[in-house]
Amino acid sequence: MGKYANVIIAVVVVGLGLLAYGSLFTVDERQQAIVMQFGEPKRVITEPGLAWKLPLIQNVQYYERRVLNLDPPAENILLSDQKRLIVDVFARYKILDPLLFFQTVRTEGVARQRLGGIINGRLREVLGNETLSSVLSPERTRILQSIRDNVDRETQRFGIALVDVRIRRADLPDETRESVYDRMRSEREREAAEFRAQGFEQSQRITAAADREATVIAAEAKRESEILRGQGEGLRTEILNNAFGQDPEFFNFYRSMQAYSQSLDSESTYMVLSPDSEFFSFFQQIEGQVTRGRTTQ
């Protein structure tokens, strides 16, 4: 009897273990879950930990709680200035409402397809109103924000929140790249020529103004120098007149020495004069004797 009791207890324990195994499940911090019964959702579990379900008749559908990446194929888009651009974008999204997500798209694979189509559609719509220069300029931030807002409004009906969308690459098609580069090069060369012409014109104006100012300054300086020279000459004449009035003999001697110094250049001056010429009056009395003869040089 004791032997059968142990078998019964073991069967009961195994049965309880199987019942617990089929009734309990765990949801970790990276997941959120929906308890399903015959394909219908019964309960949503968003908090991590241990949870329960009815064995055999209920099962669990898990969804990611983390931010997911989406890399849709590149799109060939016609811009508003009739230029084509190959745009490659990537997006990051998150499942916020697992029940709504299950009811609308059910699986992440279907969600990727729907989300990729929405992103490419909004990309065409927004970039179709933009020019190439705006796409390649800092205005790209505004464009991406507009795309993100439009996509996020549409994905909310799937229980999805769009975290971010970015343009990874924006290239011109091979057949139009060279022509666009040539046009851009011509425009830059034209702008450079215009800037050089403006710079040359400004340089000419500055040079002319500087020359005019230099001429005025030089003329003013010359006028002042002539005035000062005239004043100096007048003062010199006055001093000489005063000196002549005080000692006429010394003044005559001084003037004669100046004339000798200016006339008798040892390198290039030759003079032929009579010894008793008045020009040599101060040389005729040396040590009390009258010097006779011909004086040259």
Image (cartoon, rainbow, N blue to C red):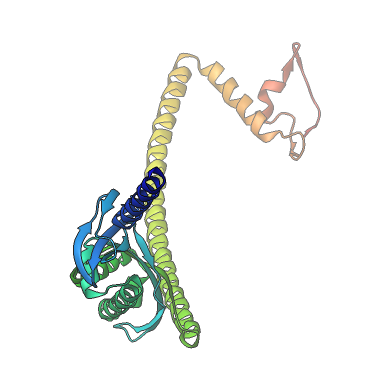
Instruction: Tell me: residue 134, above or below residue 76.
Output: above
Q: Position of residue 101 (x, y in %)?
A: 24, 68
**Residue 160 in view of the camera:** no
Farthest residue in the front direction? Answer: 1
Q: Position of residue 69 (x, y in %)?
A: 38, 64
Q: Position of residue 215 (x, y in %)?
A: 40, 51
Work out which quarter of the rendered image holds the N terminus and state it: top left
Q: Position of residue 55 (x, y in %)?
A: 28, 61
Q: Kindly indicate the quadrant of the structure image that contains residue 212.
A: bottom left
Tell me if 241 is positioned left or right of 66 in this view.
right
Q: How many marks?
A: 0
Q: Kindly indicate the quadrant of the structure image that contains residue 84.
A: bottom left
Farthest residue in the top direction? Answer: 287
Instruction: Tell me: residue 265, above or below residue 130.
Output: above
Work out which quarter of the rendered image holds the C terminus and state it: top right
At 42% from the left edge and 43% from the top edge, which residue is drawn?
Answer: 222
> 28 or 173: which is nearer to us?
28
At 35% from the left edge and 83% from the top edge, which residue is drawn?
Answer: 77
At 32% from the left edge and 51% from the top edge, which residue is drawn?
Answer: 16
> 13 or 216: which is nearer to us?
13
> 204 or 223: which is nearer to us?
204
**Residue 258 in view of the camera:** yes
> 53 or 77: which is nearer to us?
53
